[in-house]
Image (cartoon, grey):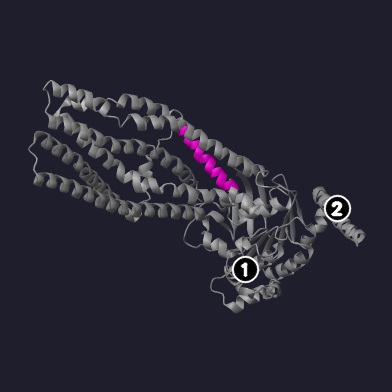
Amino acid sequence: MQKEKKQNPIAVLFSFAGEAKGRMSLSVFLAVIGEIFGMAPFFAVAVLAGRLYAGTATRREAALLSGTAAVCMALRAILCWRSSLRSHGVAFTILKNIRRAVADKMRRVPMGVMLETPTGYFKTLMVDNVGKLEDSIAHVVPEAPSQIVAPVFCIVLMFAMDWRMGLASFVTFPISILFMMGMMRGYREKMNRYLRAGNEMNASLVEYVSGIQVIKAFGRTGASYGKYSDSVNFFHDSTLDWWRQCWFWMAGVKAVLPSTLLGTLPVGAYLYMNGDITLPVLITCVIVSLGFIAPMMKFAFGTEQLTVIAANLRPIQEFLAIPEQKRPEKPVTLSGSTFSFENVSFAYDEKEVLHKVSFETVPGAMTAIVGPSGSGKSTIAKLMAGFWDATSGTVRYGGKDIREIPPDQLMSEVSYVAQDNFLFDMSIRENIRLGNKNATDAEVEEAAKAANCHDFIMNLEHGYDTLAGDAGDRLSGGERQRITIARAMLKKASVVILDEATAYADPESESLIQQAISKLVKGKTLVVVAHRLSTIRSAAQILVVKDGEIVGRGTQEELLQDCPLYETMWNEHIGAADRIEEGVKQYA
């Protein structure tokens, strides 16, 4: 099997540069010139020391050399400042474009990918992984070339003055390389583990905060909530493991590598005493060797950021590489509002959950889908809404393969109401208006009245202007559901798909929701995924699904006679209702 070609992480980063493409070059140039100016004071000191020793220095010359050093340092600061400003501008442009690319990808991947992926994953992807790239782009990219150009210039100068002093300045390199080899042993694996641990902790933190009500209700503390506690411990252990790997070796490199005097002083003294070099050359080589090590060390430690960049880019690239749903942009002509499945099979990853399913909805009437938990009912509804593409077979709407229908056109035809529909933290009025952005306030309130939610909305503190809260958490499950039905009514779609829309409702809310649904679906094709069989008794067609296959179809009366599974489910449903009623009577 051919190995996948590794991409250069810097090249991947700058593929997102967009309008900032090319602007980093000037930042690199300014940083390089700045570092060259930064080396000037070392030469000025060397020249002044030589003149002072020889007794030829004058006050004017000393002032000139000192002034030159000060001006060069000031120029270095200005150039590095301008370089940093430009590189940060490029960095933020790249981060913006990466986040936009991820957000745009979210719209184009199958909706099922979004539904099946934990929220914490996307928080980690867009906030943490992208945020960790800033320093690398703003500092490492422009500074790495500058940190190597100036030292190379100094090294060439030293070898030009005396090759023996040039070699002497590298006496600490062999030992430092050994320390660096020790530091890099297992470094990448440990760092990847550290980054993965951080991502897992962020994901479990989002889940922990979202589920805090359940955790408190059942007396589960942060320490006892296993998943969150384990992720925190994993992050703690991974962080220590990574830093323990680096601490000793890094300290060794920082201590040994700058100690160039261990080579230049004894070698320089020996050469000077033998008359092989002059004092100005000796002083210059000693001072310059002290000056080029610091930027070289920055360059060496900066290169490790390539691993950090690659590790943080990897999950972003993996998400951006997810196959997209290919849909046309030009609207097509549809004939009717009927869905038909033709030998449709579907697999999550490699596990097939639907097997050659075929049926057709009844135009202008209710088609109900029932079956045991995990049988594939909701998967059928999601395939209708275009959340996934069938693995094999064809899903048609209005006579067209839904893969040939633009997403906006399909969504204008279909209202999909799930059991856990989302409300944004904005006014209830605007949450309902999402069904039709051009709806007037009067139309919004009319839809709310039809969905039996006008009364409870008016009892809220600010009425229709009340904020729904995070994911609608200021409202009960039944209230949220009725608002989503009002939103669906405002949409005026030809087909309404209700995916267990009353699953979380209490009996009173269920009754109100059923009344709202009856108004919602007048004259429309209705598809209902239901677990409460009493709500679909009047359906024109009931499909009974078991283990991804349709094992029965017909009306209520026909299935009670011909489908043993439906008969069993119906008897269990009636029996459960009777037991609840009996329990209520006993309690009363």
Viewer-side residue, 96 vs 116: 96
**Can you tell which of label 2 and label 1 is closer to the viewer?**
1
> Picture coordinates of residue 371 (x, y %)?
75, 50
x 58%, y 55%: residue: 386
Q: Earlier in the sequence, mark 2 or mark 1?
A: 1
- Label drawn at residue 487: 1
Distance between the Cα atoms at labels 2 and 1?
35 Å
Give percent across and percent down for residue 135.
39, 47
Residue furthest right as drawn: 586
SS assignment for the magenta stretch, majority: helix
Badge 1: residue crowd in 10 Å (few <14, some 14–19, many ≥20): many
- Vertical order, 130 against 184 (above or below): below
Q: Is residue 189 magenta?
A: yes
Q: What range is drawn magenta here?
A: 187-204
Which quadrant is the C terminus positioned in?
bottom right
- Kindly identify which residue carries mark 2: 571
- The answer to whether residue 419 is visible is yes
| Image quadrant assignment for residue 534 | bottom right
361 vs 353: above or below? below
| Residue beneath the point at 31% across and 41% down | 144
